[in-house]
Image (cartoon, rainbow, N blue to C red):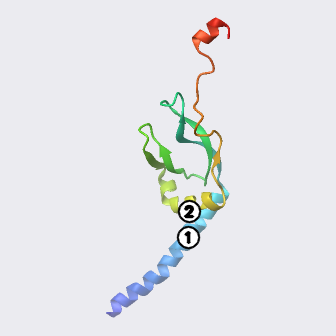
Amino acid sequence: MSPARQKLLKELLWTLPILLVIYVGVYIILSCLGGYYFNQSGKVRYRSMGLAVSDISTWNPKGCRFQYQFKNTRGEYISRGNDLGYLFAPLIMLDRRFFHPTEVLIAPETQMKPTGSRSDLMSGD
């Protein structure tokens, strides 16, 4: 191996751990400033095909929005989030798994339905 390659490898071996410490350190600060926010899993929808209902509460570090699994109207699972959320996605998933679990507010079997139909109101039931 040439001396130039050895020098490059040595610099890389010093730089990667420093960048990893900075990455994790910034995430820890953002996580300390974060909180739980209402979110939609996509499993509970108004009238089963309509808009997704806020049925879960997920932990989000300050300024980061990331959801690994969201069920869209076609029944496909997709991820969604902002740039910071995707940047810190591996740490967000670990954080939610071990420290800040997602809270289920409405069971997926429950579907949101109108409280009363026009015929119910007219019949007096």
Nearer the camera: disc 2 or disc 1: 2
Residue at 56% in and 70% down: 22
Name the kind of residue labelled 1 in the image: Ile
Report the side of 90 relative to 58 (left or right).
Answer: left
Residue 1: give x, y in percent of width and height: 32, 93
Where the C terminus falls, by quadrant? Answer: top right
Residue 9: give x, y in percent of width and height: 40, 85
Report the side of 73 relative to 108 (left or right).
Answer: left
- Does 39 appear above or below 12? above
Q: What number is the disc on residue 22?
A: 1
Q: How many marks?
A: 2
Disc 2 packing (10 Å; few <14; some 14–19; many ≥20): some
36 vs 124, nearest the viewer: 124
Name the kind of residue labelled 2 in the image: Leu
Q: Which residue is mark 2?
A: 91
Looking at the image, can residue 30 be seen?
A: no
